[in-house]
Image (cartoon, rainbow, N blue to C red):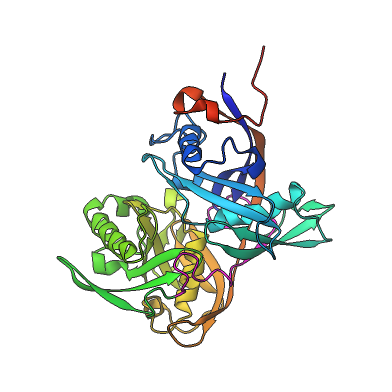
Amino acid sequence: MQLRTKATLYRGGTSKAMIVHTRNLPTQDRTLLQEWLLAAFGSPDPRQIDGIGGADMLTSKFAFVGPPSVPGADVDYTFAQVGVDAAYVDWTILCGNISSAIGPFAIEEGYVAATGASTMVRVHNTNTGKIYTARVETDGGLPRISGDAVVDGVPSSGSPIALDFKGAGGAITGKLLPTGRRRDSRYVPGLGPVEYSVIDMTGLFVFVHAEQFGLSASADPRLLESQADRLGVVDAFRAEIGKEFGIDSPITPAVLLIGKSADWDLIGGVGRRSASDADLHVRCTAIGKVHSSIPITGTMATGVAASLPGSVVSDVIEGAPDPYRIGHPSGVVSIQAVSSGPDPAPEIVKAEVIRTARRIFDGAISVDPARLSKPEEFSASDPPLTR
């Protein structure tokens, strides 16, 4: 008899995640929960054929939501990135796209009462210890779904959800500029000195000019992934920087390859965009994989880095666009970002982005107890199927 756990499938921005109430988790033990997540998502397997994963990092995501544990928040939100063809579960990031789903979920599930046409939800992300706000359009006490907001990488428009992350600097290391500088340099064998910027904004990111590794920041992700030897150098570079901050994670920090805007083909051959549509290009990479759009956490970090004169991101930005338009494999995302003040601790004045989200499915995740080392220590939140 399978172990059944109540869950909701939600699209947030360009990602999808299963969301579970904290009270409905099959276990509160983090080690056992990771084991359950790998079984539930069908990992490791590039197709995730025996689980709920969609064979893509963007759809191999999980979150649980519960009552707030800190003052000033309406809910707690914990995020997990589940590996696809590798057996890992990473808890170091908050996932900005899925963050857009938490506000509507909190309203639908009764954590927050809708207040007229617009409802503010204050979300405490337990991964980073930071609070962000989501302004959700509401109607009749529930989130509004239809609207004119367009998110590149999502085929339909929706109701805008305004995310404000200005309080999320230093999410991983406690400092917006973990090195205390806007720009650093590191010697890379075979390449020489490579300049980069480390920004800790909603997550830890390393910005570097793609051309320094012989890559293009406007290239299709599959083309970049075919250059495995060069991405291997990038990943080793990433890992060494992570070690400086005591981080041993396959995806944190992530590298954001940057470059000047150029004409580019959208992923999947669905169209072509002009260089004039974006202010810069970004490709997000970790462990030899390239994101098919851009994480919202990466978007936030890019906008903040662009607003800091002297960072490597400022090298490819002309003027001070408002908002910054970031070209990525699925299109363009805009972010309003303003920073001020001197190093080593400039202040984030603004960091806002618009997303859309939609509830897709309600049901239960079924896991075969044979895939769990201690099945007797798990509990079900949905009755087992009987004839």
Q: Is residue 173 found inside the magenta-colored segment of the image?
A: yes
Quick check: 387 above or below 225? above
Give residue 132's position: percent from left, percent from top. 62, 65
The secondary structure making up most of the magenta span is loop
Q: Which residue is drawn at 27% across and 56% down?
A: 231
Q: Is residue 296 found inside the magenta-colored segment of the image?
A: no
Number of numbered discs overlaid on the protein picture: 0
Quick check: 315 above or below 72? below
Q: Which of 260 and 145 is in front in this view?
A: 145
Which residue in the rendered view is the most extreme toward the top?
Answer: 387
Q: Residue at x 14, y 65 (%)?
A: 190
**In the picture, which quadrant includes the C terminus?**
top right
Which residue in the rendered view is the most extreme toward the bottom?
Answer: 342
Q: Residue at x 64, y 49 (%)?
A: 65
Residue 226 is at least partly visible in this image: yes
Q: Nearer the viewer, residue 271 or 176?
A: 176
Quadrant hosting residue 260: bottom left
Give residue 333's position: percent from left, percent from top. 53, 64
Give residue 155's position: percent from left, percent from top. 58, 50
Give residue 138's position: percent from left, percent from top. 78, 56
**In the picture, which quadrant includes the N terminus?**
top right
Q: Which of 159 and 241 is in front in this view?
A: 241
The magenta segment is 151-176
Residue 263 is at least partly visible in this image: no
Quadrant hosting residue 281: bottom left
Left or right: 224, with 272 as reference point? left
